[in-house]
Amino acid sequence: MSTIRFVGLDVHADTITVAVAEVNGEVRSIGSIPNRLESVRKLVVKLGPAKQLRACYEAGPNGYVLYWQLTALGVDCQVIAPALVPTKAGDRVKTDRRDAEKLARCHRAGDLTAVWVPDEAHEALRDLVRAREAAKKDQLRARHRLAKLLLRHGRRPATKMTAWTLKHMQWIASEVHFDQPALEATLLDYVHEVEHAAARIERLEKSIDEAVAAAPDEIRGVIEALQALRGVAKVTAVTIVSEVGTLSRFPNPRQLMGYCGLVPSEFSSGKRIQRGCITKTGNAHLRRVLIESAWCYQYRPWMSAYLRKRQQHLPGDIQEIAWKAQHRLHARYKTLTAAGKNKGQIITAIGRELLGFIWAIGVKTEVRRQPQTAAA
């Protein structure tokens, strides 16, 4: 009689350590195999049939390649959140074999929490968005290096000008020079890095535009709909969709807020209720863009020409949600300011509520696009 087998995999760049837990039996180690497709295929044949296997491994730097390989072979596989794997306080021994056995045992008991796994197209879009984010960080570092060099040597423009504009860069190129060859070489290198970072960001943003244009209709529809919100332009909308995936997979916005880590931590016992700062669990990339967008709601509700253009071809109910968000979040900002809260707490609270409006727009758009997708 065939039975289900739970397979725990401790995955590294070159090896995979395997353990198996029988439904009502022992947990045993199988050993290690090379992290190669052919070795994975042989393992499935050895432990199979594939339909009876329930595999899992922890999310990490190896990505989702193993997940895609196992699902293609017919194995039910889950990628597990490492921070939510149960641990024993007194357990001081950690090996690959013990980690694989623990995964298999906990998977059999149902004590593991799986993460959402994107498909290859979704993962490619997410990597592209994160590449732009890395380029923006590199640009900031390059600008800081150049600005501090000019500051150390007392080089300032004669007239006030905005930093890093075309006029500012032309001033550096024409007016800033050093007599010492070493300083001149340093200046030229820093300027080159600033210009290189700007060109890199421009190139990546163009690639994002092309990727969005080639994306499936349901993804492109959600990206366009989210831009109805104030503070959510194209790059922010693409970041939200690439990091979250399908918004309707969350039954309610509170679960999405918890996924983003914008809910308060809590340590309560008995009659004492104690809540602290936000948990910061989940997706940090998503949390960052939400906080950036939330700053827009400190200003009174307003429909700028740019925002009106973004909403031009969107359904009326989506526009109503976006307008309601402006009134609601600005009123919330004023209320919290009057209560004496600091700016960080206020913007965090606004970002959490903004996520609820994002969920509402995303779910409405996904439901609306489903019949079109099915008909196609």
Image (cartoon, grey):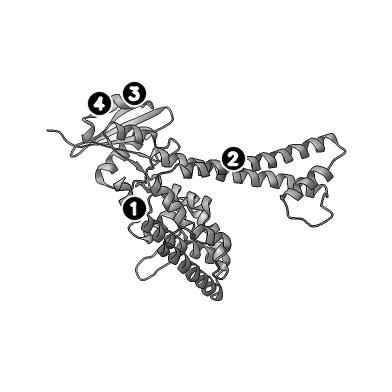
Q: Is residue 163 left or right of residue 102?
A: right
Specify the quadrant of the image occupied by residue 15.
Answer: top left
Badge 1 vs badge 3, beta-carbon distance below 8 Å? no
The Cα–Cα distance between marks 1 and 3, rounded to whole angstroms, is 34 Å
Disc with the residue nearer the chain's start (1 vs 2) = 2
The Cα–Cα distance between marks 2 and 3, rounded to whole angstroms, is 37 Å
**Which residue is located at x 46 percent, y 52 percent?**
240
The residue beneath circle 2 is: 203
Q: Which structural element holds mark 2?
A: helix
The furthest residue to the right: 179
Disc with the residue nearer the chain's start (4 vs 3) = 3
Residue 104 x/y as whole percent = 29, 38
The Cα–Cα distance between marks 4 and 2, rounded to whole angstroms, is 45 Å
**Which residue is located at x 39 percent, y 34 percent?**
65
Badge 2 vs badge 3, beta-carbon distance below 8 Å? no
Determine if residue 266 is in view.
no
Q: Amino acid at mark 3?
A: Glu
The residue beneath circle 3 is: 38
Q: Which structural element holds mark 1?
A: helix
Q: Nearer the viewer, mark 4 or mark 1?
A: 1
The residue beneath circle 1 is: 249
Disc with the residue nearer the chain's start (1 vs 3) = 3
Q: Is residue 183 left or right of residue 140?
A: right
